[in-house]
Amino acid sequence: MKAAAIAGLFALAPGVRLVQLATAKVDAAAASDETRWGLLIDATKCADGCDACVTACNDEHGLHGFDRPQTDAQWIRKVTLRDRQTKKVTTLPMLCQHCEHPPCVDVCPTGASFKRADGIVLVDKHTCIGCRYCIMACPYKARSFVHESLSQQQPHSPRGKGTVEGCTFCVHRVDRDREPACVESCGSNGNSAMIFGDLKDVDSEIAKTIRTAPSKQVREDLGLNTAVRYQGV
Amino acid sequence: MSEQFELVRGRSAGYWLLLAALTVLAAIGLAAAHYMESQGHHVTGMNNQVVWGIPHVFAVFLIVSASGLLNVASMASVFHQPLYKPLARLSSLLCIMFLLGGLVILVLDLGRPERLIVAMTHYNLKSIFAWNIFLYVGFVLIVASYLVTMFEHNLARYSGAVGMLAMLWRIVLTTGTGSIFGFLIARQAYDAAIMAPLFILMSLAFGTAIFVLFLWGVLRLCEREIESVIVQRLGRLLAIFVAATLYLTLTYHVTNLYASEHHGVERFVLLEGGLYTQLFWIGQVAVGGVIPLLLLWRCLTNGKSRTVVAASLLVVVGGLAQVYVIIIGGQAYPLVMFPGSDVSSGFFDGEVGSYVPSVLEFALGLGGAAFALLLSLFAMRILPFLHSARSVAHR
């Protein structure tokens, strides 16, 4: 099934070739809508001060800042919530929620923002014109605009000045049957607060956990059916 | 027929000085855009919190005004007001040129302006932005055809039909421009159907005001006085449009104030938003709304053309403030992801977005406006767009 996702890279838009893989397989095994990649984050396990997921993402995708916080790209960030009445403090990672009905995809004039059959929302860097309308439309502040020329990029995660970018769910890893870098790091260096998997596979750990324990979507009122779910919020 | 119109040759030093100043402004704007593109947008005041800045304020203002600049032509062709007939050519010309000025700014501000060809060849038909590309291009073609029917006697009989199409098209076009914001479900200040009619009313007010100012200015260059009968009638129209814009603004805020989920953004714009609050009350409401209305009301009794010109200038200034509050203020107010909680992060979640416009952005915005004016004056030099003094006297 994951092999299917890999081969689909050839059949999709040019931008997807950014993550073209040496191990790419035949077209017959394209990314399929029988899979929906999802991420469950248990905020009760996510420790204040731990940023293992953020560091892993930055390393994986070569997101080296320019010491300009207002314009430096952030694909995943730690957010702290303080309930105004109870003063309960919660900390959690916020990233692209890979919506089933992504507003960024709806508003993109050229179709550069797109969603794969398996639910991963990406930006085709070849057709993004840098209008930033997707950033205006995203309810999660999940996208960044590249404000300057870049160097020392990661071959599997090309970026470009003047285009918009965001979390790819580490599609280059997922298509090789690996977990996203943030999830892997949360397990090994953090507090195992993240479960990644196929929401449509009833036997997957993520599907089973969501079935049995309460979880929520951020801004569920918008009806976007996000692939990222939270517990303990 | 031809003696009803004349060229604007402008032999005075003032005319050439104006052309030179506009050329320099447009060139500086182009240079600023080139610098922004080569360095990246970090040299501007825009950032990941406020992604649309001063260039968008100017661009949206010019595009919205362009639609309203056609008012006078519509009045002549669609509503059969003979007084406006001699002004229809100028009205249509300014409409096209202001639209082009706004679009040039938008394109030059893109992260990848050289990919304009991509925007013209790849369409996501669910995107209001993509619709607008069709609407803008179609509008230029329709208004250009409309102008042809005005210049070519043999085609004059089609003028009414093309004029009607142009008027309907611009209503759809401004609906599209307003919906760029109305369709943004994520943000507290947008996500409102009223954005479309509000933008239509804004276009009628801004367009009428700019038409008065341009006509007044260009007639001065020709050492002519603006005809009192025209300016008085336009003044009355302007008053209606300004009042209607204020009414829709009031409706927008009252509706938001009724819903608790919008109390935060309303408190921000109306009370605690600092510059945005000042621009709203002083710029948009007072300078752009109440004072022009008082001036225009006074004009009913004193009949002075200068009063309408002054009111028009205030409407333009207030209009820019209004667009600034809508575009920048709407982004500066933070996204509400967790209602009931105070939110913080290293990515400025829960904070009012900081935005200090750079000189580069003003240069690009003003450059686009100068480009529109320059094109208009150039066109008036080679084709008779301006009505002659006797054409109005006869009506």
Image: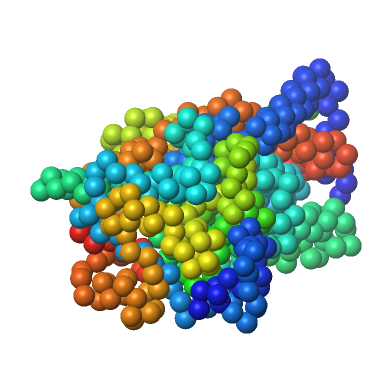
- Residue A181 x, y percent position in the rendering: 44, 55
Q: Residue at x 82, y 40 (%)?
A: B379
- Residue A65 x, y percent position in the rendering: 50, 36
- Report the front residue among B15 and A91: A91
- Residue A143 x, y percent position in the rendering: 48, 50
Residue B326 in the figure: left or right of residue B54: left
Q: Quadrant of residue B79?
A: bottom right
Residue projecting furthest to the top: B13
Q: Is any atom of residue B121 visible in this view?
A: yes
Residue B361 in the figure: left or right of residue B50: right
- Residue B339 x, y percent position in the rendering: 24, 52
- Report the front residue among B239 and B93: B93
Residue projecting furthest to the left: A86
- Report the front residue among B162 and A223: A223
Q: Is any atom of residue B323 visible in this view?
A: no
- Report the front residue among A69 and B277: A69
Q: Residue at x 32, y 71 (%)?
A: A206
Q: Quadrant of residue A233?
A: bottom left
What is the tally of numbered marks visible in this picture? 0
Check the image and tell me how it is coloured: rainbow
Q: Residue at x 33, y 56 (%)?
A: A187
Q: Residue at x 78, y 38 (%)?
A: B375
